[in-house]
Image: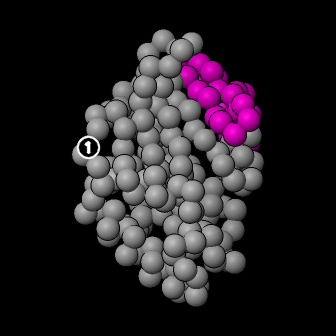
Amino acid sequence: MTVEITKLERVGAAEWAKIVLEWEAESNLYSEDFLDHATASMPMLEDLANSAPLRDAGVYSYKNNGKVTAILQANAARLPGYDGKVLRVRHIVLSPRFEFDEDIDMDAYASVLIGVFTGSMLLAEDEMIAPHLKFHMKSRAERTFGEQFTKAMQASKVFKNCDMKGSWIYLSKT
């Protein structure tokens, strides 16, 4: 499993257009229509990427070997029951290859999720400072990853709090 630990990169209009072109080409390799890829998340991410930049919200990309392998929405907000801001990571969309390539194994999928997670931790330390993070795990594979991850982290005591509640990973840094 190869994981690149890198900062997530903010996606603006120009970067969004480039990602769409790359992902359309990738979809075509599998004879699939890119418009069918992540139909619930892509329009929301596109609107946010093409809007004026916001200090506490944006679209971010995770790159592995120089290629965008995931995009996501991140926002930092004060939420009831928390001391300080919470960085929420939602609408995680992996490149079409992860949807259509039958040879993608769980290790490759997990390495992208780990990259997104570590990139989000760096985001919470730098651009969107927040002592708490929440990750939405929408697919079955993501929820399985979340359950295994939180069990390992609870045993390690790396985080002050680390739980899986429904489709969300909740964690607080020490």
- For badge 1, the amino acid type reads Pro
Q: Residue at x 24, y 46 (%)?
A: 52
Rendering coords of residue 53 (x, y %) = 26, 43
Q: Residue at x 34, y 33 (%)?
A: 56
Q: Answer whether residue 156 is magenta in the image.
A: yes
Q: Is residue 129 left or right of residue 169?
A: left
Q: Residue at x 61, y 64 (%)?
A: 108
Front residue of this view, candidates 55 and 125: 55
Q: Residue at x 54, y 52 (%)?
A: 92
Q: Answer whether residue 138 is magenta in the image.
A: no
Region rendered in magenta: 148-174
Question: In this figure, which colouring scheme has been used for the structure?
Answer: one colour
Rendering coords of residue 19 (x, y %) = 37, 68
Q: Residues within 10 Å of mark 1 (few under 14, many from 20)?
A: some
Visible in this render: residue 125? no
Front residue of this view, candidates 148 and 17: 17
Q: 103 above or below 147?
A: below
Q: 173 above or below 70?
A: above
Residue position marked by numbered label 1 in the rendering: 53
Rendering coords of residue 127 (x, y %) = 31, 35
Rendering coords of residue 93 (x, y %) = 53, 58
Query: For residue 94, what is the image quadrant?
Result: bottom right
